[in-house]
Amino acid sequence: MSSETTETTASKAAEDFGGLRMTKQRQVVYEVLTDLSKGHPTASEVFVNAKERMPSISLATVYNCLETLTGAGAVRQVHIDREATRYCANLQPHAHFYCTDCDKVFDIGLEAGADAASVWSLPPGCRVEEMQVAIRGVCGACEKCRQGHAA
Amino acid sequence: MSSETTETTASKAAEDFGGLRMTKQRQVVYEVLTDLSKGHPTASEVFVNAKERMPSISLATVYNCLETLTGAGAVRQVHIDREATRYCANLQPHAHFYCTDCDKVFDIGLEAGADAASVWSLPPGCRVEEMQVAIRGVCGACEKCRQGHAA
DNA sequence: AAATAATTTAGAACTATTCTTAGAATAATT
DNA sequence: AATTATTCTAAGAATAGTTCTAAATTATTT
């Protein structure tokens, strides 16, 4: 009982999320999501991976599970342009950088001590529930690669 | 010639946008957008309004025009969750607040002197092309209304 | 164990958007 | 001004992601 509090709560979180009934398929979907978290998979990608672990699972169930897990706050949706919704088990406040060259999505953390909402002049009296920040551009690796071609 | 520089450039912009051929339908679509800018209309809403001004216009053309205008930088797409794309003629950097109660979208400006990207710890070497900030929550008016009911 | 409720499955249905193709309008060239 | 080339529009078909529906399965409560 050493790594209990040093690691993130991701691994134990699978068991209990606000009284959510953890069915086998929800467990599988959640595991896929934590395993592929860096990949920000779409529902279909989750489906493919879930099917390897549980061949009987259906796409509709994957959608159901993703919705349930999102509703329970175990998982976040990621929206970039109007592309297929991606899913992300990183619950820390963060933005998403989408590289138009390699099509990858990167998590972008907050600067130390910064608050994402603070730069926006929100009208008084409104209540913020969620914030989606999507940044499009070219990532460092692709940018470097481009310069190479140009030379 | 007094209001020339005091107002935004919105009105004169309709005529010439980076050598864009300003066809009658593009003009109509652009005008609808500047007129309904506060409403953040979807393509279908633009279509309905454009049809009043030009009954022969088709939905496909509205989509084409919106894409062309977006490409030319005359108009911005607004993405909120995975709802239908909305369009916005406000080119100033701003975020969008979507009220889950009244379903309205509000433009949110930057705090004086603030830079939207500054709070995010972007990896070195990457190039930012666009930033979409969507804030979901309850607007001031709806929040006030709720408190009234609770009393 | 029986009854009730929640979940899964498979496929149909839906919606926003893109694609296709033909024809119309506009611009360029002679 | 006539001809050719290019771009744009229109209408509907096609597509992709997602949601809905109904029946079957699984879990929970009585």
Image (cartoon, coloured by chain):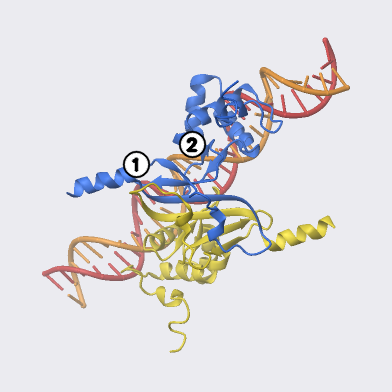
Chain colours: A blue, B yellow, C red, D orange
Write the residue at 51% across / 27% down: A32
In the image, residue A20 sits, relative to residue C16, either above or below, namely above
Q: Name the residue under label 1.
A: A102
Q: How far apart are marks 1 and 2 (CA)?
A: 16 Å
Task: Categorize mark 2 by other alpha carbons within 10 Å: few (<14), some (14-19), many (20+).
Answer: some
In the image, residue D14 sits, relative to residue C23, either above or below, namely above
Point out residue A151 in the picture as x, y percentages from the top left corner: 17, 49
Foreground pick, B76 / B84: B76
Q: Name the residue under label 2.
A: A42
Task: Categorize mark 1 by other alpha carbons within 10 Å: few (<14), some (14-19), many (20+).
Answer: few
Point out residue B90 in the picture as x, y percentages from the top left corner: 48, 67
Residue extending furthest front? Answer: A2
Give the mark toward the camera: 1 or 2: 1
In terms of sequence position, does the residue under pointer 1 or pointer 2 come before the other? 2
Locate residue A91: give its quadrant.
top right
User: What is the count of numbered marks?
Assistant: 2
In the image, residue A76 sits, relative to residue A4, either above or below, namely below
Write the residue at 43% across / 82% down: B5
The amino acid type found where label 1 is placed reads Cys
Write the residue at 68% across / 58% down: B102
- On screen, residue B116 versus residue A147, left or right, reads right
SS under mark 1: loop
Point out residue B27 in the picture as x, y percentages from the top left corner: 42, 70
The amino acid type found where label 2 is placed reads Thr
Chain letter of mark 1 equals A
Point out residue B147 in the picture as x, y percentages from the top left corner: 79, 58
In the image, residue D4 sits, relative to residue A105, either above or below, namely below
Can the viewer see residue B107 in this picture?
yes
Chain letter of mark 2 equals A
